[in-house]
Amino acid sequence: MIGVGVIGCGYWGPNLVRNFARNERSQIIGVCDARYERAARVGAEYRVPLITDQPAKLFAAKEIQLIVIATPSFTHFDLAREALQAGKHLLVMKPLTTRVDHAEELVALAAQRGLVLGVDHTFVYTGAVRRIKELVDAGELGDIFYIDSVRINLGLFQSDVNVVWDLAPHDVSIIDYLLSGQEPREVSAIGAKHVGSPTENIAYLTLRYSDHLLAHIHVNWLAPAKVRRTIVGGSRRMVIYDDVEPSEKIKVYDKGVTISQRNGDTDAAYQMLVQYRSGDMSAPNLDPREALAVESNHIIDCILAGSQPLADGAAGLRVVRILELAQRSIEREGLPLKLQVGAPPAGRLSP
Amino acid sequence: MIGVGVIGCGYWGPNLVRNFARNERSQIIGVCDARYERAARVGAEYRVPLITDQPAKLFAAKEIQLIVIATPSFTHFDLAREALQAGKHLLVMKPLTTRVDHAEELVALAAQRGLVLGVDHTFVYTGAVRRIKELVDAGELGDIFYIDSVRINLGLFQSDVNVVWDLAPHDVSIIDYLLSGQEPREVSAIGAKHVGSPTENIAYLTLRYSDHLLAHIHVNWLAPAKVRRTIVGGSRRMVIYDDVEPSEKIKVYDKGVTISQRNGDTDAAYQMLVQYRSGDMSAPNLDPREALAVESNHIIDCILAGSQPLADGAAGLRVVRILELAQRSIEREGLPLKLQVGAPPAGRLSP
Amino acid sequence: MIGVGVIGCGYWGPNLVRNFARNERSQIIGVCDARYERAARVGAEYRVPLITDQPAKLFAAKEIQLIVIATPSFTHFDLAREALQAGKHLLVMKPLTTRVDHAEELVALAAQRGLVLGVDHTFVYTGAVRRIKELVDAGELGDIFYIDSVRINLGLFQSDVNVVWDLAPHDVSIIDYLLSGQEPREVSAIGAKHVGSPTENIAYLTLRYSDHLLAHIHVNWLAPAKVRRTIVGGSRRMVIYDDVEPSEKIKVYDKGVTISQRNGDTDAAYQMLVQYRSGDMSAPNLDPREALAVESNHIIDCILAGSQPLADGAAGLRVVRILELAQRSIEREGLPLKLQVGAPPAGRLSP
Amino acid sequence: MIGVGVIGCGYWGPNLVRNFARNERSQIIGVCDARYERAARVGAEYRVPLITDQPAKLFAAKEIQLIVIATPSFTHFDLAREALQAGKHLLVMKPLTTRVDHAEELVALAAQRGLVLGVDHTFVYTGAVRRIKELVDAGELGDIFYIDSVRINLGLFQSDVNVVWDLAPHDVSIIDYLLSGQEPREVSAIGAKHVGSPTENIAYLTLRYSDHLLAHIHVNWLAPAKVRRTIVGGSRRMVIYDDVEPSEKIKVYDKGVTISQRNGDTDAAYQMLVQYRSGDMSAPNLDPREALAVESNHIIDCILAGSQPLADGAAGLRVVRILELAQRSIEREGLPLKLQVGAPPAGRLSP
């Protein structure tokens, strides 16, 4: 039985509490929030023994093996470092940290102590994204040409982070997962601030992986309706993943184009022989389990097996690296910036 | 009764023939296509008196007052110039031309001869876009914060133009119309070529109008499903225009955010007081007429009244100016480029 | 070249004119409407030689081989009889007639004269319905359990027919086609009149084919949105046909249930072993041609080949038989009525 | 603090546990299931003090004031009677009982003992249905013409009840609520059994309230996709409630028809003057709270105030009365049956 302590009982934390409470191999030992009444509320619901506003009490509790950090992003690094130093396994909400060097330090520390460091890249644990990954890995989509991801809503304006750090981790982590940890060679981003917000509430990110592989992300807190749609365009098939759709979240289109170049033809306008393939669409049946149930169970597996999770510290670091670059590009009005990976990340992607 | 000659009987031309044939104030006198059999087919359907593969025969026909040009883009300029020189009124498919100087010359020529020069910015004539324009002009949306337009499909790959010149004229002309001809200060674009195509089949355009007003366009010939969705985000209300939706193409959301800055507060993280407004959505009843029926009727009105149409040569020129800049930005890997308007366009936007 | 005369230039007639004008093997010789100006309008659009308000002129025209009847239902019988007597092939809008004996007479007359008698069961010519028929015939759906069809809208209230005679011919003809002309053993229907209408504007029809095969139809002129959805439930697969959907009109679900009865079990509540199969959904690519284009071309084929069309007089008769019974059931407040087929229809279903 | 005991920890029970655990005015004292391991699982999640497979232990527990019954329908009556006799307030899942006389007895018993008797007509507590009720009561829809409700899915085949008793309670309770407890004068129903099921898996119910007011329900366990859509057609406005839609569950259409009868006109076919009104659609912003949270909180309010809930025993009885009649009509092949209300229900609808 894994003892779990959850720090941060605002919007997302209680979902983690619920999933670890429900799992038969874990139990919630403590909950913590800087606002005590929030910890008390969820603590009462699950009759949690230890309710506190002091993270240190959780780090000190021997019955706790796993610390879940669900606090604002800028606090992740300090809390995570302390937890690792106290010998606790970790699950940190996205983004792992708000600085690349911080993420690197956590990855190194977890590796050194032999502790599990998971990042809550929630979508990587959905039936939908896992199914797309299977299609990619099986070659069903052919070569990936582009990934286009839109994640917009009338979102909660936050004062400590902009929309890039708040929403884009979802898209970047999905793309990172689908591309097996491949990193883009160039990142550019453009954003805008509205209604007096000190931070960007709309942004467009472009990740250039190669001449033929482009990823593009639109994140927006000021959209009137919720759109969460990722298109993966491949040479053989194309996928639309619409997360708002209650059923049929993934549609696989057997559609495509092939072009033959005619030789010896002088008229440029008629040089191409384009063939269109417009076949059936199919919506595969998906694992319907809640992503957090899959994720919390997987973290428990990793702790018991001594392995690193699907979304590990290295994945968290790669995502932070892209976000930091996007942020710098926004500040330079959209200038494309090269990604430089000084040292390879300490961890590895567990496929 | 306005006599009409249509040049180009491929995909779009027959729709123009049908609409001018149906209008009680016009009749089709001649149809022309470089491939004679295409002209013959539509000519037989409407029992058109003059069927030819020689545009000159239409320019010479006295019964023809209006020439409609529905040929590939690169041929527009020469045909349009000849038609104007022959004293004919003109309706040219989008884009008006493929070069800014060509568009300028046509605008000047039409003005000099006192001829109508319409550009088939079809969407400007839809009930949906006209309704959004009314909302904008009435101040119902407040200040415009952003316009986000997506127009993707498994489109026809073309060898003479890329996806920017093929699809983006629709989005740029809608944006130009909604913003009453205001021009962006900066344009950037990024694109990619796939499956051996010599031209870009996917592209993202960013038009920066001011610090607070951003327009973004995603055009794509290699998408598995048809998406045509434009979001207009305003300070008071927001609109989603989904052209693929069979009914309720426009949804007006009474949603928004206001932020008050607290004074004298030292902790930046808690300085904002954000208020969300999440009211009803309404879908206004729209004029259901086919856009081409409205447009063809409007062109006839303009010829009879001696006025310029809603989408006139000046609008066509502004659109070409943006497309040309986007093209140059793509060639420089997304570098933002400033729009320089040497001389004001010769025409004016008829509101 | 088949010469065509169209009687009735209201809402639907011009669509027929357009399709026969476009077909390269037919031409419109004459158009007729009791309101001359309506005939004149469509006649001018296509420069039709003969424009009249006298059907007799079309019957007398030697260049006309095919008469299309697109007038109100109650006039079909007289016009159709005259046309057949004049030796013309016929395409009659749905319903064929408003009385069973009238339909029988027309079927007999056409057979006797060796003339084509087609009924405009438009949906039978759509790519969607033809594809479902292929699935049914190939056994892909297994045994058909039920067909549920909803066709509702804010429709045009008509004074001469109720919603059953106006809308249900579409559903009944689709069901008749899918079931290869099988006739129900019992029909019941219930309806209601509103807003002072002398005829029913909402109705529910139940067609009982066997203990295990039920068809149900909901037709409604007083619904706020357009719904046109037919579900075909089979033992192996199930189909949803949503005609309002712009793409993916047909979805084939690989879903189902099998139940094994356990023997020797005393507790009734646990006697069943139910197994659910919840596989993928697929949306087959469909023939995108307009149904009327397919239908008009097929009618021309039949005239040239001397064969009867897919939706022939016999199909038209079977549909009228069901509608008449439904009407009688409505008048008797929903009493289920047995279908009695005195004599087999003179024609046969051409598969 | 209200102590709660929940009997039945299968599919629905745990949702009740979760909501009463979360509510700050109640706590879960005991959980019970005939299969002990199911009680143990949810008991562990919430660290519930009393876990048992003996309902009697809950009835005996002094800390428990409210018993929630979430067991199969046929067990409701016995358990509910015992609970009331033990002096416990009650919340019973739908349908209240499987026989009218049983429901009558429970209503009488609760009234006699002064205990709260709530029925889990969940939808009555949704923001959507409450909003429609407000529109109806405010006269916004005018006179109600019809209510058409579809609730279909690939549902769980049950051996003890058919689809009418399983799904139709939702629709009947919504209709009962919208019509303020008005009872139909006649009920008819038709059903079919498939795949060897001993009970009906598809059924159509018609409730005739008056000449002008018809309700119709389609319930189906053998449908390939989930449809939950209720249309309320009124003389002034019409509503579509689509419960599967993630947002905009309610659409209010400002559409309608008015018909004037012309006097002294001899031609019946032109006697009607029909006027159509096709105005805007609006989707009101809804209370987003989970129905069970609203319901559980409301039950607590009722216990504390000594009042009966919105969905009380009388509502539960009216629903059972309709279901029992529908069942009898199915057995008589769709024969319309009159509803006879021997004695008025003991309770009253709390509006």
Image (spheres, coloured by chain):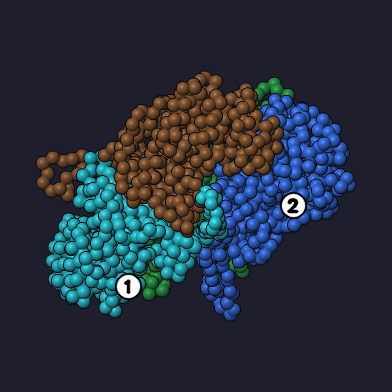
Chain colours: A brown, B cyan, C green, D blue
- Chain identity of mark 1: B
Residue D328 shown left or right of residue B38 in the figure? right
**Which residue occupies the foreground of this view, D181 or A16?**
A16
Is residue B89 at all visible to an observer of this figure?
no
The amino acid on which the numbered mark 2 sits, given as a three-letter code, is: Leu
Q: Using the rendered image of the protein, determine whether residue D26 is visible from the camera's viewpoint.
A: yes
Residue in view at x 79 percent, y 28 percent: D54
Residue drawn at (56%, 43%) of the image: D226
- Decide: is C51 above or below A141: below
In the figure, residue B29 lies in which quadrant? bottom left
The residue carrying mark 1 is: B350
| Mark in front: 2 vs 1 | 1
Which mark is drawn over residue D310? 2
Name the spot of residue D45 as percent of width and height, x first. 67, 31
| Residue C209 percent coordinates (x, y) | 57, 43
Q: Residue furthest top?
A: A305
What is the number of the mark on residue A104?
A: none
| Callout 2 and callout 1 share a chain | no
* Inter-mark Cα distance, 2 to 1: 59 Å
- The picture quadrant where one finds residue B19 is bottom left
Tell me the residue at 55%/24% (across/down): A87
> Which residue is at 53% across, 54% downward?
B272
Q: Answer above or below: position of A71 versus A89.
A: below
Q: Is residue B175 left or right of residue D346?
A: left
Identified by mark 1, the residue type is Ser
In percent of width and height, residue D59 lies at 83, 34
- For the N terminus of chain B, which image quadrant? bottom left
Circle 2 residues within 10 Å: few <14, some 14–19, many ≥20:
many
Q: Nearer the viewer, residue B149 or A350?
A: A350
**Which part of the image, by quadrant, shows the C terminus of chain B?**
bottom left
